[in-house]
Image (cartoon, rainbow, N blue to C red):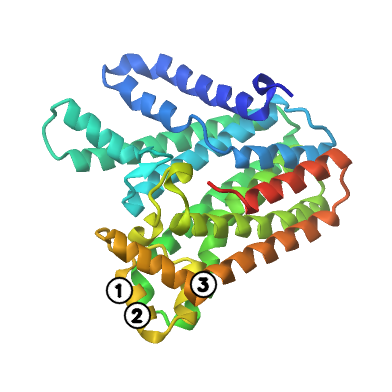
Amino acid sequence: MSESSSLSSKVQRRLDATIDENLRVLGPIGVDVPAFLEQAASFTTGGKRLRASFCAAGFGSATGTSDHTEAVVRAAASIEFFHAAALVHDDIIDRSDTRRGAPSTHRAFARHHRASAWAGDETHFGLSAAILLGDLLLVWSDQLFVEACALVSPENAVRARAEFSKMRSEVTVGQYLDLVEEVAWPVVPIDARASRAKTIAISKSARYSVEEPLVLGALLGGASDSHVEQIRSFGLPLGLAFQLRDDVLGVFGDEAVTGKPSGDDLREGKRTLMIAAAQELAAPDDSARLDELLGDPDLSDADITWMQSLIAESGGLQRTEDLISTSLGEALTGLAAIELDSESRQLLEDLAERTAHRAH
């Protein structure tokens, strides 16, 4: 399949077309609108498009076709807009300076404020503008999913819309739980942190990164309830593997590949399953020091190196890698139980391996 006809290209064209149409309609409102929407265009260009791929694979698993219908493309683009909105808001919450090797959205808007020689606090402006852009991306996500649903049967549309609403609500609640965890840790016993971290990983990321795109595609394709449940048995453990790999990359990833500084999650104070494992396995003094350093935005390179070493040497990293392997195995076991054509099965197996073993 040529690149021009690939799902990724089709989704990118749909994203671009949505932004262009909004620029045409909204641009005349004011001279500062184009720069606002151009940030949306910049932020939604590129990326792994894993969620779009899972959406298309879910549709194919239900219909037996690998064709990227317009309903699939619009639904996949909707999920990508939702993902972009989540990243914009997540970067604000985490105080992240970069995303994919470029300034995060709130930092980009702060730079725009400074370059324009405007009055007031550039940081506050950047945060405010990014919140609004994230909200606008959510609006576009809704718009495209409505359009996708209009291209399938009314019954399929009703089921898909209900699932889409549930997904959005759960991600928001998961994000809140993640926010709580970064401040509640002093009163949470060490042996309770892993289960809380797993709950957050599932609700904030695992479901909407893998399981929900699969299910949404399947529902749009008219999947039976039993097929949807089988898809979930594959998607949820794979989604957990996805998030655990994200946690590993957030601490040990290569900045040149991930687009974020190595150890960035340590500065942001991410209390992940890997951190919980390291704290359980490390000596009490080392565990206490890890707690003290975690979330300090001014961590030195030496601090980062020490924390990385502790996580690795304590066994926290290996426990996480083992859980990734276990989760991938559970996903593939679930996949084996689903009745699929050979092309759909191979596609899902390839996506599973790519998801669990990715480098960015």
| Residue 150 seen in the figure | no
| Residue to which mark 3 is pinned | 316
Whether the residues at callouts 1 and 3 have beta carbons within 8 Å, the answer is: no
Q: Earlier in the sequence, mark 1 or mark 3?
A: 1
| 219 is higher (above) or lower (below) than 211 | above
| 277 is higher (above) or lower (below) than 349 | below
**Residue 349 coordinates in the image, percent (x, y):** 76, 48
| Residue to which mark 2 is pinned | 288
Amino acid, disc 2: Ala
| 64 is higher (above) or lower (below) than 97 | above
Front in this rendered view, residue 36 or 330: 330
Whether the residues at callouts 2 and 3 have beta carbons within 8 Å, the answer is: no
The residue positioned farthest toward the bottom in the image shown? 284
Q: Secondary structure at mark 1?
A: helix
Q: Give the position of the N terminus as an image quadrant.
A: top right
Q: Residues within 10 Å of mark 3 (few under 14, many from 20)?
A: many
Q: Earlier in the sequence, mark 2 or mark 3?
A: 2
Identify which residue is drawn at 55% across, 37% down. Answer: 80
| Residue to which mark 1 is pinned | 292
Amino acid, disc 1: Glu
Q: Secondary structure at mark 3?
A: helix
Amino acid, disc 3: Gly
